[in-house]
Image (cartoon, rainbow, N blue to C red):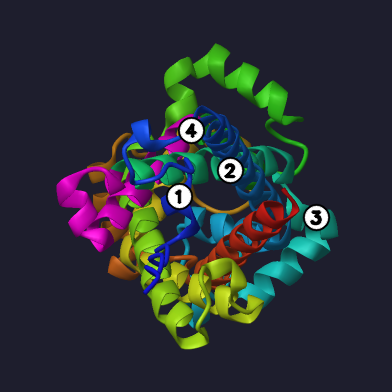
Amino acid sequence: MAKTAPKADDHDTDLDGESEEHPAAEEPEEWVVKAADSKTKQFHTMLAGGTSAAITRFASQPLDVLKVRFQLQLEPLGPKGTHSKYRNVVQAARTIYAEEGLLSLWRGHNPAQVLSIIYGVSQFWIYERLRYISKNTPFLKDHKNFSTFLSGAIAGSTATTITMPVDVVRTRLIAQDVNKGYTSASKAIVTILREEGVRGCYRGLTSSIIQIGPMMGSNFMFYRLFSRSAEEYFQVDNRGQLPSWMLLAMGSTAGLLSKTLVYPFDLIKKRLQIQGFQKNRTAYGANMSCWGIIQCFQLTVQKEGVRGLYKGMTPTLIKSGWMTGLHFGLYDKIFSILQKIS
């Protein structure tokens, strides 16, 4: 009886196109083909990651603007925020549109787009490489869920460190008053380096790593768990063959679960990123001065209560579910299409 080839757990498990057989059993010509296939798959990984990130960023930018405005507002949201600048998602969107115009809902989009593309390319490439390495590591090979979580956490943390200066610029462009502050992303970088030094470009990095590590690890882990069940149900060989609505649903659910776990650290990161920049945002209410994660946590709870740590949660959950689902779904579909074309 012919031996049935085992089903691949993910398309990333064969990223380098290497056989489990000993290299000496391969013909030289086959190794050349495998080397070319490895480079092609890595290129497809980066192209799919960057493209899916760019599309997702454009679609979700208005929700990101709302989230940042809510996170930086010290005044209460909801019914208690009678005199607050922003009170809820609909009212905030209308206010921004009336006072600043429709395009303001995409304020900071250019640096955000650069951030998303670089982040998407580096995150998925690093993740795929780590997953391949984990296949050949005894402990990680036998603990797939932990391996997926660890690979996602390291990939997300590394990509965050790479893109942090762009994230700081994006946050400040969204937060600043109209006709105040920076006139462009490039001038923002120059000004920050001149006035605050390199450290200014990495404000909020620690809280960001604390947030992104477990969040991205959870994202990948939940998504892979859901994927394996869906592949069995639909009887397909890999995620790229699943219906688009299923990929979107799995990604959205993974995003909602992971974001809820680490949201307070995202709020703290945003508040740390505007330190030293408060003079350019006076039209949105009071500003908080804090110079570390612990102090920022303490002041937030002291002035706004524990609920203050979850300001902006509504647009964040909408954005996170929508953005994660779209990002993962597009990545798998684009990767699958590129593989078929090649």
User: Which marked residue is nearer to the observer: mark 4 or mark 3?
Assistant: 4
Q: Earlier in the sequence, mark 4 or mark 3?
A: 4
- Residue type beneath disc 3: Glu
| Residue matched to label 4 | 27
Nearest the viewer among 49 and 203 is 49
Residue sitting at the far front: 1
Which mark identifies residue 41?
2
Q: Earlier in the sequence, mark 2 or mark 3?
A: 2
| Residue matched to label 1 | 14
Nearest the viewer among 33 and 24 is 24
Nearest the viewer among 12 and 75 is 12
- Residue type beneath disc 2: Lys
State yes or no: discs 1 and 2 in contact (Cβ < 8 Å): yes
Residue 221 rendering spot, x and y as whole percentages? 35, 63
Residue sitting at the far top: 194
CA–CA distance in space, label 4 to label 1: 19 Å
Vertical relation: 165 (above or below) 327 = above
Q: Which residues are magenta?
A: 134-162
